Amino acid sequence: MLDRDHHVCDGAPAHTRRRRRLGAGSGIGTGLAMTFLFRGLSRGAMSVVVPISAVGGVTLPVVVSVAFLGERPAFVTWVGILIALPAFWSISKGTFGATSVSRHSIYDALTASGGIAIQYLCLAQADPASGLWPILSGRATAVMTILLAAVVLIRNAPARKPATSSLSALTLSLGAGVLAAAALAAYLYALRTEFVTVSVVLSSLYPVVPVIVGLLFLSERIHRSQAVGLVAALGATVLIALA
């Protein structure tokens, strides 16, 4: 009886520590992704940072899931994934137009994609019994990571006049944080019924959203490459869903 109680008592903290570690890991990934994504955007390199971070953030988890987690998606799923990756690139690159490409922009994009991959993979390892605790601990760790990165990066950044007031920036940041947490919670629940490869690809359809919003509500015109990318993304989604 004593041994059994001792085993139970030992098991619960171990489970809790694993849950916290995975949540913290996803938060570090989120913090790195957001920090370097927005640094790239502030440099005016949106057409470089967004496509690379989007495609890299999908590709890395897919490769790791197949190589190390033993996932074997169906052939149709692979066809959908191979269609989706260039579709993401076409959609997001066309959204922001052309801009000069710099080595620093590519570094920002690659770092952001690595952070996105860490975020996805850590959450994929969370026990379903953990509920939303990995998301909550991840949000706290993400905030600390962003603050630490901001202190390091701002020291070497030139002074700029803020484009919005502090109150507006705080409101927008809080809103973005809530929406991001909701998106990660949906991804976490999707993992309970789908492969990581499938969940990651479908979760990474976010470049489609600003294009559709601009087309429907802002009277924007899309480029031919965006139109092709939208059709390809829709087809890829159907293929993945059918599998």
Image (cartoon, grey):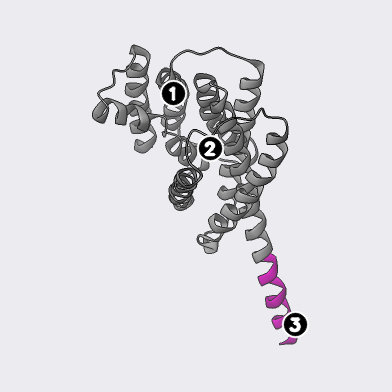
- Residue 62 is left or right of residue 220, and the answer is right
Residue 55, x across and y down, in percent: 52, 27
Main SS, magenta region, reads helix
Q: Amino acid at mark 3?
A: Asp
Dot 1: element: helix
Task: State the separation of the CA atoms marked 1 and 3.
Answer: 57 Å
Q: Which mark is residue 92?
A: 1
Q: Out of 133 and 232, give the one closest to the viewer.
A: 133
Task: Work out which quarter of the rendered image holds the C terminus and state it.
Answer: top left
Q: Which residues are magenta?
A: 1-14
Dot 2: element: loop
Residue 108, x across and y down, in percent: 63, 27
Q: Is 5 a magenta residue?
A: yes
Measuring 58% from the left and 13% from the top, which residue is drawn there? 101
Q: Amino acid at mark 1?
A: Ser
Task: Say which label, 1 or 2, has the lower sequence index.
Answer: 2
Dot 3: element: helix
- Which residue matches tag 2? 72
Q: Out of 2 and 111, give the one closest to the viewer.
A: 111
Look at the picture and state if 83 lies above or below 197. Answer: above
Task: Say which label, 3 or 2, has the lower sequence index.
Answer: 3
Q: Which mark is residue 203?
A: none
Q: Amino acid at mark 2?
A: Arg
- Residue 127 is left or right of residue 76, and the answer is right
Q: Are marks 3 and 2 in contact (CB under 8 Å)?
A: no
- Residue 103 is left or right of residue 81, and the answer is right
- Which residue matches tag 3? 3
Instruction: Determine crowd level at label 3: few under 14, some 14-19, many 20+ residues with C-alpha closer than 10 A.
Output: few
Residue 162, x across and y down, in percent: 53, 34
Measuring 49% from the left and 38% from the top, which residue is drawn there? 200
Task: Work out which quarter of the rendered image holds the N terminus and state it.
Answer: bottom right
